[in-house]
Amino acid sequence: MIDQTRALDWRDGDVPVSRRFDDPYFSLDDGLAETRHVFLHGNRLPARFRDGFHVAELGFGTGLNLLAALHLWRETGQSGVLHFTTFEAYPLPPEDMIRAQSRFAELDAVAKDLRPFWEQDAREISLSDLRFRLIEGDARRTIRQIDHPVDAWFLDGFSPAKNPELWEPALLAEAARHTAPGGTAATYTAAGHVRRALDAAGLVTRRIPGYGRKRHMTVAQKAAG
């Protein structure tokens, strides 16, 4: 097993790159802009936000997507609680996650609220506007621990070519099964086998313009029932 404390390289100061998957944790160009384009706009947020809205994520990484979602929740004056469940096989050490998050000055206020929990290596966070749960382990086995339907999926594993486990049809089918009627999913990848797996699982996919140098990405939706 790779020593997780030595599993990272850093580029451009604070961009972490996984040695295990030879892939950056977020865009080398602008990770926050990519997250907003792919996962927030891709899931039509904040228009769909409501009290109890449930985001689930495959691949927690640095926690950037959580910070961006909670920042948007607060910035747009939402009332109630955002629920966020994430699956991660190889959680980053707290010091690496905090270092990576520090790159995004716009998210500083949110990052400061969550930093004490990362320092304690917490797996659950409860704030007045957030219920967060990180489920550690292989998502192919742990995804069944989801405890209520998902309104929006952030499918954010490393590249399908380098991290095929998070893009297996059986896992995507299980994600679809836990999706609420009318729920959505978004991912940076436009790989044909990923779209076909989501379609086969009962979601309707579309290929739309991607972020930056990526020409296309994928969004999907479950029938309203």
Image: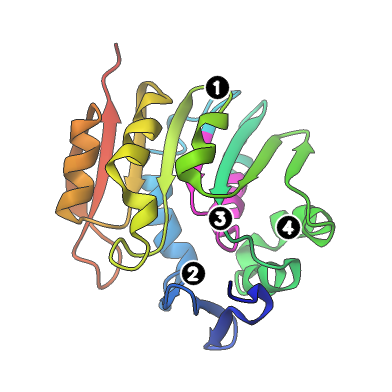
Quickly name the residue at label 1: 148
What residue is drawn where x is 76% and y is 42%? 125
Mark 2 or mark 3, earlier in chain: 2
Q: Return the residue nearer the eye: 181 or 140.
A: 140
Circles 2 and 3 in contact, beta carbons < 8 Å: no
Asked whether residue 102 is in view, the answer is: no
Q: CA distance from mark 3 to mark 4?
A: 27 Å
Q: Which region is colored magenta?
A: 55-72
Quickly name the residue at label 3: 89
Q: Return the residue nearer the eye: 8 or 4.
A: 4
- Kindly identify the amino acid type of the residue bearing the numbered disc 3: Ala
Q: CA distance from mark 4 to mark 1?
A: 29 Å
Local SS, label 1: loop
Quarter of the figure with the N terminus: bottom right
User: Residue 112: x and y, percent?
Assistant: 78, 59
* Numbered badge on residue 109: 4
Quickly name the residue at label 2: 25
For the view shown, which residue lies furthest in the top direction?
A: 225
- Kindly identify the amino acid type of the residue bearing the numbered disc 4: Ala
What residue is drawn where x is 19% and y is 32%? 200
Mark 4 or mark 2, earlier in chain: 2
Q: CA distance from mark 3 to mark 1?
A: 21 Å
Q: Residues within 10 Å of mark 1 (few under 14, many from 20)?
A: few
What residue is drawn where x is 60% and y is 23%? 51
Look at the picture and state if 221 lies above or below 4. Answer: above
Q: CA distance from mark 4 to mark 2?
A: 21 Å
